[in-house]
Image (cartoon, rainbow, N blue to C red):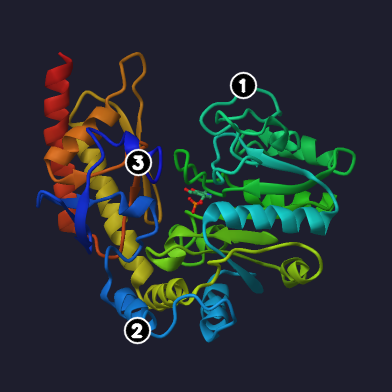
Amino acid sequence: MSSGLRAMMQPHPLFIDHARGSRMWDIDGNEYVDYVMGWGPLVAGHSHPRIISAVGEMLPRMQMIGMGHRLEYEAAEAVVAAIPGAEKLLWSNSGTEAVQVALRLARAASGRNTVVKFINSYHGWHDSVFASVAYHEGGEAATMNSLGQNPHAIDQLLVLPFNDIDAVGELLADAAARDIGAVLLDPVQSNSGLYAPVPGFLEKVRELCDEHGVILIFDQVIAGFRVAHGGATERYGVEPDLSVLGKAIAGGFAQAAVVGRAPIIDLVTQGVFHAGTYNGNPIALAAVQATMDLLNEPRTFEGLDSVASGLRTRLVDAFAESSRPFEVRRIGSLLAIDEQAGDRPPIWSDLTGELVNHGILALPSGKVFVSTEHTHADSDRFAEGIRAALRVVDAAAV
Ligand SMILES: Cc1ncc(COP(=O)(O)O)c(C=O)c1O
């Protein structure tokens, strides 16, 4: 099994044979419009011909070299050019690993150990930050979220409510005394409901970090290349010291990066250990470069915005016809379907199971990823699927 979460898909995990554009076909030949999009990376859809061609050209040339190569720099330049304020880049294989090295850099740069994150925000599955995501016991101490996790790994992790400017101000006022060296922040809580920052929140966090000698890290593993071309940095106009990028950066191949201020990134040559056998491998970087080229094309983000916005309208209309209250939020090409079940048992998970019978794949968490390959016709089909699935699930609930 590749992931515990994938095993929980309703009505059971699907086994896919092939995928192209906005579609996937399972091993029985059924076709689906896919809104899972690999859990986020496929901003250009499945099997995009230009990404496949770039990877196909690289494949016979070199695969693993354990040396430098041109794309290490050329693809890095393309990424850095897209993210405002980014000066240098480190390659890593996954968001989890990239968050790990970003935290190391922040501790080394600030000379302090304690990290602040926000309740519900997911930053990867490693022991030091997988806490207060699925549940939180209250207060500023982080709650472990996995059996087998080392409890001491979160001794120096503090958590605050997202969008609570006063709470951040109060805690960071004691940053030096409390050994706080980094704030790790997903600017749109992308993996836990998709909530935009309230006006002034990011600006204030930036100001407080500067005032108290704290390194600000934006985890843009989902937000990057999705809430805008330059991610949350571009959309909200606030520059962190470091940003973690992943998922959409490589259009479906495994690669992630940390970008940020040069003096901090340069610490990897001054004692901060950063490694990874597969970091920056030519195959993945060919995919990064092709993805960056695609996203640089004029009107790409206008197109994504138009389809995602049309999808939101259609979903809102479909839910409005049922007695079930659902809220649909959208930022760029990310949507979140949020059931307001109240006292009634929630049905979204059952709905995703029923949607499979209507040719639609959607995540039980309610996250919806739109790609450049999705069309308004796909959105019509999703909305029709929701109507049909609601009828079935509502009838079963009576
Ligand atoms: C905001 C955020 N940060 C980090 C990660 C971890 O990335 P990866 O799954 O590539 O390790 C994720 C994964 O979903 C994420 O959503």
Q: Dot 3, how many residues are within 10 Å of its Cα: few (below 14), some (14-19), or many (20+)?
A: some
Secondary structure under tag 3 reads helix
Compare marks 1 and 2 and give the one earlier in the sequence: 2
Label 2 belongs to which residue? 57
* Sequence-wise first label, 3 or 2: 3
Disc 2 C-beta below 8 A from ligand 1: no
Say what amino acid the circle numbered 2 marks.
Glu
Q: Counting residues from the N terminus, which is met first, the one under dot 3 or under dot 1? A: 3
The residue nearer to you, when weighing 300 against 38, is 38
Which residue: 61% across, 53% down?
99
Q: Residue 6 carries which label?
A: 3
> Does residue 195 appear to the left or right of 392 in the view shown?
right
Which residue lies under the disc numbered 1? 137
From the viewer's perspective, tell me whether residue 65 is left or right of residue 364: right
Badge 1 density bin: few <14, some 14–19, many ≥20, Cα 10 Å: few
Q: Where is residue 350 in the image (x, y as percent from the top left)?
A: 24, 28
